[in-house]
Image (cartoon, helix red, strand yellow):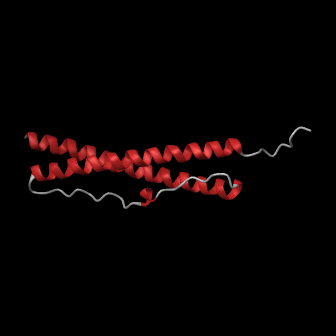
Amino acid sequence: KDLHEKNKTLRASYEALVAEYAALVKERRGIRDEALRVVFTFGAVTAELRVSAAAPAPRAVAKTGCLETENRRLELANVELRSRNSLIREENEGLLSEIARSRAQTPTDDPAPP
């Protein structure tokens, strides 16, 4: 019974991390598109878009006949996903900061005072 409860908890955590990963990758694509737009429009942002966001999506952890094995696999997958999600979140925040800084440095359409 304890193995079943642990499995249920780990599986729920895993599913939440996979959903978070997908949302972070989607956010990254939007940030990348915005950064490219800023770069092409204003030529001000030189942010490095790391390849890590293009890493393949995590593979699903298959259910097995052995809950102990499945739980170990889920625990490892959860640790890896937390790490990947943290890295992508950190990079996304850095890129958003670069975009905001670039916009703040871009001259407005208003003419400068004489």
Instruction: Point out residue 63 in the picture as x, y percentages from the top left corner.
Output: 17, 56
Q: How many marks?
A: 0
Residue 41 versus residue 96 in the image, above or below: below
Q: Residue at x 40, y 52 (%)?
A: 22
Residue 11 versus residue 33 in the image, above or below: above
Image quadrant in which you'd find residue 40: bottom right
Residue most toward the right?
Answer: 114
Question: Is residue 45 left or right of 13 when viewed as pictured?
Answer: right
Image quadrant occupied by the C terminus? top right
Instruction: Point out residue 44 in the picture as x, y percentages from the top left corner.
Output: 67, 52
Q: Residue at x 47, y 48 (%)?
A: 91
Question: Is residue 39 left or right of 80 when viewed as pictured?
Answer: right
Instruction: Point out residue 56 in the picture as x, y percentages from the top left corner.
Output: 37, 61
Question: Is residue 84 left or right of 26 when viewed as pictured?
Answer: left
Instruction: Point out residue 100 in the picture as x, y percentages from the top left corner.
Output: 62, 42
Q: Residue at x 45, y 44 (%)?
A: 90
Image quadrant occupied by the N terminus? top left
Question: Is residue 16 left or right of 110 when viewed as pictured?
Answer: left
Image quadrant in which you'd find residue 8: top left
Image quadrant in which you'd find residue 6: top left
Q: Residue at x 53, y 55 (%)?
A: 48
